[in-house]
Amino acid sequence: MEPSNKYRQYDLHCHSTASDGELTPVELVKHAVECGVDVLALTDHDVTDGLSAAAEEARRHDLEFISGVEISANWNGNLIHIVGLNFDVENSQLQDGLAGLREQRTERAAEMARLLTKAGMPGSLEGAQSFSSGQILSRTHFAQFLLQAGHIKTMQEAFDRYIGAGKPAYVAAEWTSLKQAVDWITAAGGQAVIAHPGRYKLSATKLRQLIEAFKAAGGKGLEVISGKQDINMTRNLADYIIRYQLFASVGSDYHGPSQVWRNMGKMPTIPKGCQPIWNLWA
Ligand code: AMP
Ligand code: MN
Ligand code: MN
Ligand code: MN
C-alpha cells in the first residue's frame, strides 16, 4: 500500500483565555487552521471550560479536535505539568480533582499578592484578575500586571525576579501528586503525558526518576517535542520513550501572539523508533 504523503500536523498542547492564553478558544482554533494544524488539543491549566467552544469551532473547519488539560502536579517538591489527552470531559473524578486545584490557585494568588505588596507592588490581585477572563489565576496574569504597572520590562523578568521558583513572591502549593493526576486522567479514559520534560531544570538522574515514577503511576507518554527545544533534549527524551515503552506527544505550548517564539504548526517530526500517542486512538 502507498503511504499517505500528506503528513498530518499534530499540536497537542496549547492555551486559550480559559487559562493563561491570549486567544479565545474560537480564535485559537482559527489560528491553528491558519498554521496548518490538522489535529489539535486545547490544554488549559487545571480547567476544561474552553473545550466545548473549541470543539464546536473545529467542526466548522477541517480540524480534528481532541480534549485536553494541563494539570499542576507535585513530584518531590517540583511543580510538574501533566497533560491529559482524549478523555471524557464530563468525568466527575477528573472534574472534582480540577476543581480542587482551582481552589488552591485562588489561595495561592491571594498569598502571592500579599508577598508582592510586601515587596512594594500593591494591587496585584485585582491587577492579575483584570488580565484573566476565565476562572483561574495564573502567574502569567501576575506577570502581565507587573509589566503593565511598570515594575518589570519583560514577562521573563517577572519570573526571574519575583514569581519564579525560589523568588520572593513564589508560593509553593501542594497541587496534587503525580499518581493522582495520572489517575484522574486515566479514570476519564484519557492518556497522561509529561508536559515539556526538558523545562523542569532537573538533573539527568532526577529526570529519569520522574519518568520512572510516572511510568509506574500508569502514565503513557512524554512530550518529545515541545515548543522550541534543544535537539539534544529531543534525542534524550526519545531514548527514554523507547527504553520505558512510552508514547511520544507533540505540542507547541502556544499561549498567544505576543509569544512569537512559540507559534503553532511546523513542528519537527517525531524521532525514529518512537510510537506516537495517537496510535492509541486509532
Ligand atoms: P502557573 O501555572 O500559574 O504556576 O503559571 C505557570 C505559567 O507561567 C506557565 O504555564 C507559563 O505560561 C508561564 N511562565 C512560566 N515561566 C515563564 C517565563 N519565564 N516567562 C513567561 N511565562 C512563563
Ligand atoms: Mn501557561
Ligand atoms: Mn506547562
Ligand atoms: Mn502549557
Image: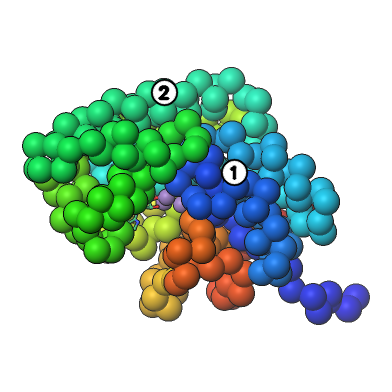
Kindly state the secondary structure of the residue where label 1 is placed: strand
Horizontal side of 265 relative to 208 (left or right) equals: right
> What kind of element bears circle 2?
helix
Inter-mark Cα distance, 2 to 1: 18 Å
Colouring mode (rainbow / by chain / secondary structure / one colour): rainbow
Of 181 and 128, the residue lying toward us: 128
Quarter of the image for residue 12 reads bottom right
Q: Residue furthest right?
A: 1
What residue is disc 2 on? 100
Q: Position of residue 62 (x, y in %)?
A: 82, 59
Residue at image position (59%, 43%) is 68
Res 4 → quadrant: bottom right
- In the rendered image, the quadrant that contains the N terminus is bottom right
Q: Give the residue number, with chain letter if any, for mark 1.
A: 68
Inspect the image, locate mark 2, and give the three-letter code of the amino acid beneath it: Gly
Q: Residues within 10 Å of mark 1 (few under 14, many from 20)?
A: many
